[in-house]
Amino acid sequence: MKSGKTSVFLNGFIKENPILVLILGTCPTLALSTQAINGIGMGLCVTLVLMGSNIMISALKRIIPDKVRIPCYIVIISTFVTLIQLLLQAYLPELNKSLGLYIPLIVVNCIILGRAEAFANKNSVFDSMLDGLGMGLSYTVTLTIMAAIRELLGAGTVFGYTVTANLITPMSIFILAPGGFFTYGCLIALMNKLTEGKAKEKRAADKCMGCAAAQLCSQAEEGGAE
């Protein structure tokens, strides 16, 4: 049984994965997943903004008037996005150029606003920080995996290093829009398959809880397997 804090952190990786389960932030996901380095860069930027905005919104939730909470969220989020963009321009200009317009568009990213409204506005500062960190890292990992697949199949490289060499011929369609949608769809299907199996196991376990014959059923299944 996972502790409450661990559950909050891990929630975004499978159960509420922002890309593959909640289907949020689709536009930057498809546009920036052509290179693995872009996936890591964008993911870390989103993670920092998520953590900062979640902490600030949770700390100010009793002060922010309910009627204007969304505009207040956007002001807080845009502050962190501006800081991230200035840091990128100063220290990582190439990455900033590669990510381009999608950095300022983090302000209206549904993942950021969604966690602010659904979690940070209702929970403690520490839990909100864990939620932002977990959601951000899951976004980073998922986006990087998707980008690595597209880069490998479309250009024969991963993080700019040649991998396939003479093994397969790169298929340029994977770094174009159709390849992005195809890869995205396959990953969503895989996630659905994995979560469906876990959901079935959980339903079966919940169904047997409190049943006097649960142990007898388990022994019968083991005997049948033998």
Image: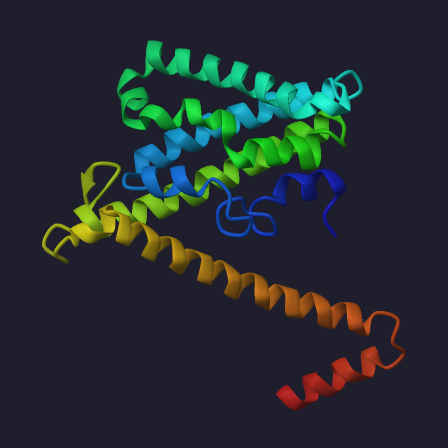
Q: Residue at x 66, y 90 (%)?
A: 224
What colour scheme was applied to this rendering of the protein? rainbow
Q: Is residue 122 left or right of residue 196?
A: right
The residue closer to the viewer here, 171 or 63, is: 63
The residue closer to the viewer here, 221 or 61, is: 61
In the image, residue 9 sits, relative to residue 209, either above or below, namely above
The residue closer to the viewer here, 100 or 204, is: 100
Q: Residue furthest front?
A: 67
Q: Is residue 146 left or right of residue 44?
A: left
Q: Residue 142's quadrant in the figure? A: top left
Q: Residue 30's quadrant in the figure? A: top left
Q: Is residue 112 left or right of residue 155?
A: right
The x, y position of residue 172, in whole percent, is: 17, 50
In the image, residue 19 sits, relative to residue 37, either above or below, namely below
Q: Residue at x 32, y 17 (%)?
A: 92
In the image, residue 113 sits, relative to residue 180, either above or below, namely above
The x, y position of residue 118, in whole percent, is: 69, 37
Quadrant of the drawing holding the C terminus: bottom right
The x, y position of residue 212, in whole percent, is: 90, 78
Q: Residue at x 58, y 16 (%)?
A: 75
Q: Residue furthest left?
A: 166
Q: Residue 162's quadrant in the figure? A: top left
The residue closer to the viewer here, 174 or 6, is: 174
